[in-house]
Image (cartoon, grey):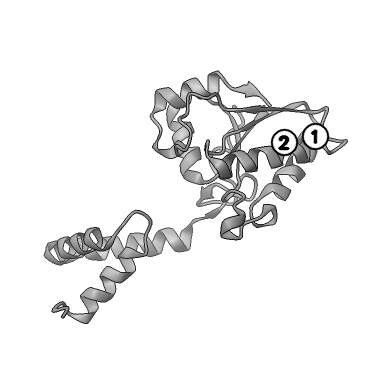
Amino acid sequence: MNSLPKKINDLIDVLTGLPGIGPKSAARIVFFLQKAPKELNTDLADAIVDAKINTRTCKICYNLSEEEICTVCADEKRDRSKLLVVEDPLDLIAIERAGAYQGFYHVLGGVISPMNGIGPDEIRIRELLERLKKDQEESEIELIIATNPNMEGEATAVYIQNEIVGDKKLKNKVKISRLARGLTTGADIDFTDDMTIRKAIEGRVNM
């Protein structure tokens, strides 16, 4: 029989629904918060609500932002001839942290995964193609595909490549490359060290 109060169990259940947090970890967090000063609990709750209410997706690249356009897209010093495709904002953060890339980004918001019911229409591939058609009018573009090196990431990369090659307006205007194989197969970019990411970007290969 569970001897914990219902409100404590409810909080543990909520935390267990977060990525990477199991029941034991959730319980430890709850017990820590119970012992912590009330101000810490209040600050945490306020920060969660504030982040949810006052952040949005950038209307250009779909990174998280407090404004309509994120700080990366607003940076006029960046290289407009390069566009790097990532699965989610955590991958973007990891690549920015490595400091080897000065172009722009496009956040897909996931990968193609038929087993999970996610097809091309459920992620931002259509938005990527529309963006490329607009940008290539100004200059040729190198599209660097940086989806994770696993089955879903590879399938997504190949799908994007095929869509571009099959488009008359894009196939001769967009150079497609993939991060070098310094990344371990099955690895997540946001868990990869800075040096490996830098080498993967510098050694990227054409698709």
Residue at figure coordinates x 46%, y 63% from the top left: 53
x and y percent of residue 37 in the render?
Answer: 14, 63
Residue at figure coordinates x 47%, y 59% from the top left: 54
Give the total number of marks visible in the rendering.
Answer: 2
Residue at figure coordinates x 82%, y 33% from the top left: 137
Residue to which mark 1 is pinned: 165
- The residue lying toward the viewer, choosing from 32 and 46, is 32
Secondary structure of the residue carrying tag 2 is helix
Which label number is shown at residue 161? 2
Residue 139 higher or lower than 32, as above or below: above
* Residue 167 falls left or right of residue 95: right
Q: Amino acid at mark 1?
A: Val
In the rendered image, which quarter contains the N terminus? bottom left
- The residue lying toward the viewer, choosing from 172 and 44, is 172
Whole-angstrom CA distance, mark 2 to mark 1, is 6 Å
x and y percent of residue 46 in the render?
Answer: 33, 64
2 and 1 marks in contact (CB < 8 Å): yes
Q: Amino acid at mark 2?
A: Gln
Residue at figure coordinates x 51%, y 49% from the top left: 64
